[in-house]
Image (cartoon, grey):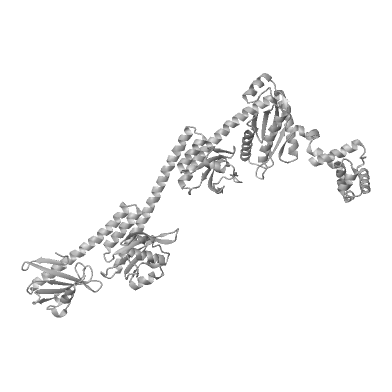
Amino acid sequence: MEQNEMTMRGFDGALTYYVWILSGTEEWVHLCNDPLAEHEETLFLNEDLWPYSSDLESHNHSTCYNSQLGSQLFEFAMEVPKSTLVRACIHSGRALSEFECDYFVLKVRNLLLQQTLEQYWQENDAWLEGLHSLTSMLKLDELLNNIMHNVLIAIPAVDRGFLMLYDTETQKLTPKANVGFGPSIYDFKTSLGEGIGGKVYKDGIGGIFNTEQGLAAMSNVQENNMKNMMAAMGVKDKFPNLLAMAVPVRMNKEKIGVMIVHQITKKRKLTHADLRQLQGFADQAAIAITNARLFSELRETNEYLVRRNHIHEAFTKLSLKDSDLIMITKTVERMINLPVSLFDVTKNEWYPHYTPLSKKLKDSDLLNGWEDSIDTLTVTINEIPVHLYPIVNEGIPIGFFVVELQRLLSPIDTVVLEQGSALVALKMVNTYSMTDMYYKQCYEFFNELLQYKEPNLLVSKSKDFGLSPDKPLFVTVMQLSGKTQVSQKLESYQRKLIAALHSELKSFQYLLFGFQDKVTIIMNVSSESQQAVAIQKLDNVVELYKNKDAPVLMGGIGMVYQGLEYVARSFEEANKSLAYISNRETSGIISYGSIGINRLFISQQVEDIQQFIQEVFAPLHSPKANSIDLELTLRTYIATNQSISETAARLHIHQNTLYYRIRKIEEILAVNLNDSSDWLKLLLACHLSDLY
């Protein structure tokens, strides 16, 4: 039995009857919404065949019996679910009585009400399913597709639809769920104002679009988007005539997308009630999207916290095992799955010592002025993009994790670097503390050497500190100065200096320790040539500090002596040499033996020396003396060792003029340049003025 063919008992057995309804499109359709067949249109729409015998107002229906057809036709109006005109035909074989007519109309009305209730229940189920989706489904794609399926159930007048969300990054509306479209719908990405969806999203107002309005709204769709839409609809040449509804998807006042449905097969007119229903589903979608995003954020946060906890536990275990820097670095590399090396700024050393990454960067100027940075840096070194994560102690960077950026770092990668750097900093500081304790012991032993009270005990101790008491030795004192440094930063530079000295002097026997801004070294050498090699090594270290960012490094070297009892003398000479070069305010290192006559003035106050120079040359600074360059003449005369010809040549003057100037100098200074005492006085003043 077909859906539009029914039977009714109560008259003379079972009678077949048909019901037609005037649809929203002003066309008669079967109760099941199928269009009328051609013979049905001819038969039941021919008013001449059915001269109605009763009044619609008096009996709530009109009816007519056609004896030739053996059928009776009824026409009446239904108020529920909406004002609808109904025609029903029953093959009765006779004219029905008034009671039978009322009963038949009542039966049809009851059937239509049942159908209406079933439709209401179906729509209600769709709503309930949509609400259920909001609480039972948190995967956004599945949830949105489920909502779109429910839309088509609740609004049977539409055939297909899709949901678009606004992507803030691309600033386009992007399809996220669809029913009835091909896969190319997901390539239909429109700008604001483009197409029906773009217009509704931009205006923030939903609407029903007839064919003409829909085509007008689609007129500004870009060519590639139009191709994608037509492919999704399964058409090639011409955009189909269709009816559409579209509403904005918003959460509170924030617009997040648009929902669009199409009517392909004409069933009835789309109404504002349909539009309200669609808006209701759009509101569901907004809640679903918000819930899913909140859940996703919560899940990501939870996963982040769980992973952060696992990371913390992993590094805690490394700390308890007292793992070395190599193991810590390898753990960081394994956790972030990128090449990682650790660079110790103090020692200028890589951990692990030999890795593909450290080999690529070993000969490069890794820090390039960033050694004081406590912020993370992303730079390119030797055409390799790297991320520098500083290991900081008391505001001073003491090392860097160097990560080769084969991809962007994630937040959890940063957590790994953060936890790893904390453990590395602790490890390095512990090493510093142990080193400082050793240097304190060295300092105490050195003071014992300076006093030299128990020779036999000192000989024994010297072996414990790596010295050979039977070999010649000399003392070097190096100092960092020239800049105002915070104590932590100066300490960092001193650690770098000590690390560089250890690296250069590893082939020698020596005792080294740092105290305040100075580093003291006692070094064994077997010959003067070996001392020369050692001094060259010290010069190499000084060269490392000849840049604008580092403090000035100066050093003094004492003479070589045989025996520990001469440590104090060599130390004193080293300090005098340091004082000599410090007065000149230049970086470098100088040995006591190369100072020569200047040793006599090292202990003198600078002010006394400068006063002596002033007293000698002051008379030559009078306006008259300056006018004939007497001081320059005297200095040139001294520099040429009293050579008249060479002095005149250097000054570009005649020898007679030079003789005149020499007489004026002797007259003004009250000296005789041929007198050895006067000559020594002038020679010494000239020499000291070059130094002070």
- Residue placed farthest to the left in the image? 12
- Viewer-proximal residue among 552 and 450: 552
Q: Quadrant of the C terminus?
A: top right
Q: Residue 491 lies in what quarter of the image? A: top right
* Residue at position x 92%, y 43% in the image: 666
Indicate left or right for 377 with 525 as reference: left
Indicate left or right for 387 with 508 as reference: left
Question: Would residue 589 be seen by someone viewing this image from the given angle?
Answer: yes
- Residue placed farthest to the top in the image? 456
Q: Quadrant of the N terminus?
A: bottom left
- Residue 280 spot, x, y in % from top left: 32, 62
- Residue 615 spot, x, y in % from top left: 86, 41
- Residue placed farthest to the bottom in the image? 48
- Viewer-proximal residue among 557 and 492: 557
Question: Would residue 454 be seen by someone viewing this image from the given angle?
Answer: no
Q: How many marks?
A: 0
- Residue 159 spot, x, y in % from top left: 28, 64
* Residue at position x 16%, y 79% in the image: 47
Question: Height in image: 132 above or below 526?
Answer: below
* Residue at position x 28%, y 70% in the image: 269
Indicate left or right for 94 with 508 as reference: left
Indicate left or right for 226 with 677 as reference: left
Q: Residue 461 lies in what quarter of the image? A: top right
Q: Residue 586 lies in what quarter of the image? A: top right
- Residue 67 spot, x, y in % from top left: 8, 77
Question: Height in image: 595 above or below 374?
Answer: above
Question: Height in image: 150 above or below 394?
Answer: below
